[in-house]
Image (cartoon, helix red, strand yellow):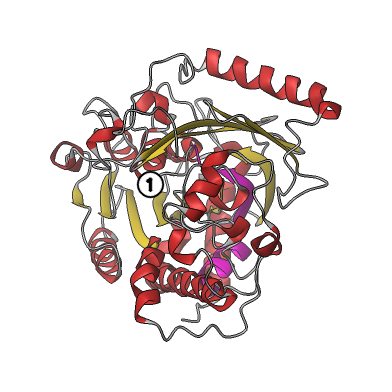
Amino acid sequence: MKLPKISRRRFLASTALLGAGTAFGEAGAVKKRPNLLLITTDQQHWMARGAVDPFFETPALDALAQSGTVFENAFCTTPQCSASRSSLYTGCYPHKTSVLTNIGSGTHLGGVQAPLPATFETIGSRLRHAGYRTAYFGKWHMGNNDHYSAHFDRADLDGEPHTGATDKAISTLREWAGSAGQPFCVCVNYINPHDVYDFVAASRKGGLEPKGVVPHPSSWAETFSGKPKPQRDFAEKEQGAFLTGKPDALWEAYREFYRDKVRLADAETGRLLQHLELSGLADNTVVAFTADHGDMDTQHRLVFKGPFMYESLVHVPLIIRVPGACPGIAQGFVTPCDILPSFCALAGAAFGEVDGVSLAEGLMGGSYPERDYVVGQYYGKQKWVNPIRMLRTRQWKYNRYLVHGEELYDLRNDPQEMVNLAADGGYNTQKAELAALLDQWMTKSEDTAFSTYWPTNRDGTRFSA
């Protein structure tokens, strides 16, 4: 779907809005409260945009990026759906929400697959308290649906996450467009490109013929030499086993299959953005687009998501468009925890004690909060438990597995994360500095992952892939 370019009418209207009605007051609130639209996809990595990698077809996201701010260093708090979403909608890291992995993922994970406790404020409740109408459509995947539905004036938690979510959102936007004086916040959550998991069944049927797929540089070069054991086990014994030993064409077909799922999500995003334009709502609606986590997309001979912290899995897209604000690129580190306080600051709503920080000042032309690094977490998935902590700076990535060792990557000289330097004595100083930073963050954040008893697997072994 080809989206209309920003119109002169909207540009002039929104510029006037920015200059006269959205200046920050002493409390950080804006004088004229904007509508808010949050669009979230599932399992879309940061390069899965046509503007970043021409292999992908994402005209809606490319158009949004041209008129908004692209955050080039956005990282999920954890590469797991439920846990990451708990951060997005509460502003807190998974070890605080207690949603450490996907809910309903198996009793062998020792009960940590429990739903989000009914004690948290969310984007919905925070903005409702501030006088906003709030709505939620599509994938929720955090449990306690009855309780959290009440955080929204209109909710279909875990409802139809494809075209149905778009249809319900557009219907709601039409209905609420005439509510003078009462702004809205609508959250729309798509399942794709998560449906790349359907590739397993499709591959068994055969007939997949990739057309002009360009493999990622790390796809064929990875040997897992010097890498933590769970990576090879995941690839050869677990969810990646169906591709092990198969012809390159099947790996390429996976990448094309993933590309198609990204395209489907982008088409639904395009429908929403087009409605905003044609209805005039875009003049006073802040739009944020992100993903809960990425997908390995055949990089490092890996697919889906699992016990690793590669860029393709933890680096996610984040684009925020504020009407009238100059488009641009923000280089600082951000996480999903920042979206709730940012929305609340733009709306003049309180956001309480959260792990995120507000990006509103930067979005309005001021400065962004500065972070020297970002931290990621991982607990486990299905029948394996492999707690990991990641600390990433501009140049370095340090990963600590609970029992499977460490990883250290020089991202400046090895952006594909091929050579693990953790055992190289020549990098002991860098590793020690990063390890100390991680320890400090875990202590300050009360993240006791590596000092808390972790459950055993069903076969009695602990922490093995």
Q: Residue at x 56, y 62 (%)?
A: 298
For disc 1, the neighbor class at 10 Å (few under 14, some 14 to 19, many from 20) is: many
Q: Is residue 207 left or right of residue 371?
A: left
Residue 287 covered by magenta stretch: no
Which corner quadrant of the image does residue 267 belong to?
A: bottom left
Quadrant that contains the C terminus: top left
- Residue 39 rendering spot, x and y as whole percentages: 41, 56
Depth order, front residue of 247/262: 247
- Residue 433 rendering spot, x and y as whole percentages: 75, 20
Residue 289 in view: no
Q: Which residue is mark 1?
A: 81
Which span is picked out in magenta?
57-77
Q: Residue at x 86, y 28 (%)?
A: 426
Depth order, front residue of 307/91: 307
Residue 144 in view: yes
Q: Residue at x 22, y 40 (%)?
A: 143
Tell me the kind of residue under disc 1: Cys
- Residue 59 rendering spot, x and y as whole percentages: 54, 74
Q: Residue at x 54, y 62 (%)?
A: 297
